[in-house]
Image (cartoon, grey):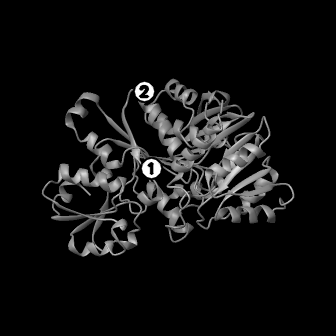
Amino acid sequence: MKLGDLKKYKKVLILGYGVEGKAVEAFLKKYCPEVVIGIADKKDGDDYLNKQKDYDLAIKSPGIHPKLVTIPYTTGTNIFFHNFAGKVIGVTGTKGKSTTSTLIYEMLKKAGKNVQLGGNIGRPALEVLDMFLDQEELEKNGAQWAVLELSSFQLQDITASPHIAVVLMIGEEHLDYHADVVEYVEAKRNILRFQIADDFAIINRDYPASNESDVLTDGQVFYVSRERETVDGCYAFGQSIWINRRGNIEEIIKVQDIRLLGKHNRENACAATMAAKLAGVAKDDIAAVLKAFSGLPHRLEYVGEKYGIRFYNDSLSTIPDAAIEGIDAFDDQVETLIAGGYDRGLNYAQFGEFLVKSSVRTLILFPPSGERIWEAVIKAGGKETIKRLDVTTMSQAVLFASEETSAGKICLLSPGAASFGTFKDYKDRGEQFKAQVLALGVA
């Protein structure tokens, strides 16, 4: 929705008053001062949605499903897209969004571009828009770029697409919000639906749901892969990251020089490299960022060492695929895994099979999904080779880990499940893990 159209409404209801809702409120007060603002939030009671009948327009927060909105509505993400005068690089996927978005942002910043990072990471989109509506800022710093991490919630009702759309791996997540996997995947694919011929789509070839999304864009398609060469795109092959554009092949960096841990991060590095290259960033600036960037908090984050045990925090792992990638990043060094948490009905069969074949010998499990993980392990034949310990607090988990893990091995927190119930969110879970490890007196 254009700002001019938004100003025509007399009474606007903010649906959801979290981080995004508060950003909407600040934006409306600054740019639409005549509008009467209302707020409806779940914490105000079960009947909070009834307020809609008294307003002309709702601005919905991502966590509220569109089916719950009964009046005309828009979102902060849509307001951003229809009012931002610069170019947007949007990143979505089940996992890797934050890492890839941050890499792209750092690469553009390294190249001296006027760029901001926001969306599902950092600033809400409307805060980014507010920064870029300043004409003096535009004249001073030139062309504007915004890198937005976009969740399925933000994409489900989007009406515009970014200039450069990045589709990472798409797996299975948020089935407590979406009706089914189909709705979730289709929401992700909306990032491509409104692109035009001058736009670019960067698509991960290694996952069917991602790879098959290319038919939805009218933009120019580039592929990324950690498994195979691509005709147009960026890929990890042999010992290097390469870009191939119409047969012109360029080596970007040696894999051994990338600071990020894990094979899965080669996918993220390829996607970020391709996006940065399309945005006009030079090879040397791309390589410099890949050599320096060590990762985000709560994603394969080194905490410290005690009793010869190395502790790593991977609390951002909220699906089984991410936990598998986390374990795989350490080449058979993970002996103890802390996993489980909120149960969103995800399929743990493949995770169980992986664990039985892995180096993990002790599973420390949080309820309720810990039980389902253990059932998958038993079904895969791991009852006699993997020890199970159940916990309800992080202090218990870390204490058990310190007792069960051998010197020279790794204890990894990589839950493969959401954090709700026991913890506030994945950040709280990761911070509690780090605090308990540090309480052991790590080196």
Q: On residue 288, which mark appears? A: none
Q: Nearer the viewer, residue 437 or 142?
A: 437
Residue 245: image x %, image y %?
A: 55, 36
Kind of residue at disc 2: Ala
The residue sitting at 49% across, 58% down in the picture is 188
Task: Name the outermost residue toward the left.
Answer: 34
Between discs 1 and 2, the one toward the N terminus:
2
Q: Quadrant of the C terminus?
A: top right
Q: Please name the residue that numbered disc 1 is placed on.
A: 219
The residue sitting at 58% across, 52% down in the picture is 169
Q: Does the rendering let one see residue 266?
A: no
Q: Nearer the viewer, residue 225 or 57?
A: 57
**Which structural element holds mark 1?**
loop
Q: On residue 111, which mark appears? A: 2
Position of residue 423 relative to residue 260, above or below, is below
Task: Name the outermost residue toward the right.
Answer: 384
Residue 215: image x %, image y %?
A: 52, 58
Q: Does the rendering let one see residue 117?
A: yes
The answer to which image quadrant residue 265 occupies is: top right
Q: Nearer the viewer, residue 79 or 221?
A: 79
